[in-house]
Amino acid sequence: QVQLVQSGAELKKPGASVKVSCKASGYYFSDYYIHWVRQAPGRGLEWMGWINPKSDGTDYAQKFQGRVTMTSDTSFTTAYIELSRLTSDDTAIYYCARNRRRDSFAETVDLWGQGTLVTVSS
Amino acid sequence: DVQMTQSPSSLSASVGDRVTITCRASQGIGNYLAWYQQKPGKVPELLIYGASTLQPGVPSRFSGSASGTEFTLTISSLQSEDVATYYCQKYNGSPLTFGGGTKVEIK
């Protein structure tokens, strides 16, 4: 079954870092970009960036440059996002999502993980 | 960066009504525009890509159109299961920006 399964909820203190995983199954992991999107409580969707698991190429939204790192491990068919220097504004659900087309440029997404709630609080 | 402006931010309509949501890009993005539906407490789902191509499995009452930098999502006959927030997203290059969302409720 084609799916993305994310790691569990996290509670972090301000200034800390968090790393969320996204395990893919049911398809050839290397062929599809993985995007990360977050959603603060009661707010809209915010695109954070993507990683190409085949090349390890990445593209980050400027807002997160210097604070975000997206990686992947093809052996474990898992993508990761790490966000550092957390503040309360980073409290959100973090989603991974698969590019709609294989071996294509970064575009729409048609498969989402279940989301991981990251709470930043002292 | 290209800004994506959705309107209205919310609407209330009756079952069976025709509903229209607009997304305006601050500059040209071709037809690289997608629409997503996010039902309360659920993960977003892709409805339309390429401005007007329906994702497989999406009911035909949903449609999308484009005119220059203005994009429209239409629900031809609103159903109770369509209660959701709808987002547009441009994808003609980084950043892949989402619109602010339109919350659709039943009157």
Image (spheres, rainbow, N blue to C red):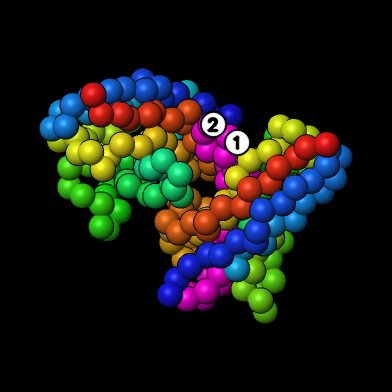
Where is B5 relative to A49, above or below?
above
Query: In the drawing, what numbered circle is on residue B1?
Result: none
Task: Report the residue marked by disc 2.
Answer: A43
In the displayed structure image, the side of residue A18 where residue B63 appears, left or right: left
Image marks 1 and 2: residues in contact by CB distance under 8 Å: yes
Mark 1 and mark 2: span between their CA atoms? 5 Å
Name the subunit of mark 1.
A
* Residue A78 in sight here: yes
Specify the quadrant of the image occupied by residue A1. Answer: bottom left
* Residue B63 in sight here: no
The quarter in which the C terminus of chain A is drawn is top right
Q: Residue at x 62, y 52 (%)?
A: A116
Task: Report the residue marked by disc 1.
Answer: A40
The residue at the far bottom in this view is: A75
Instruction: Tell whether position B106 is magenta.
Output: no
Q: Residue at x 57, y 39 (%)?
A: A39
Marks counted in the figure total 2
Name the subunit of mark 2.
A
Give the residues drawn in magenta, as a range: A24-49
Q: Residue at x 52, y 56 (%)?
A: A114
Query: Pointer 2: residues within 10 angstroms few (<14), some, or many (20+)?
Result: few
Query: Pointer 1: residues within 10 angstroms few (<14), some, or many (20+)?
Result: some
Specify the quadrant of the image occupied by residue A57. Answer: bottom right
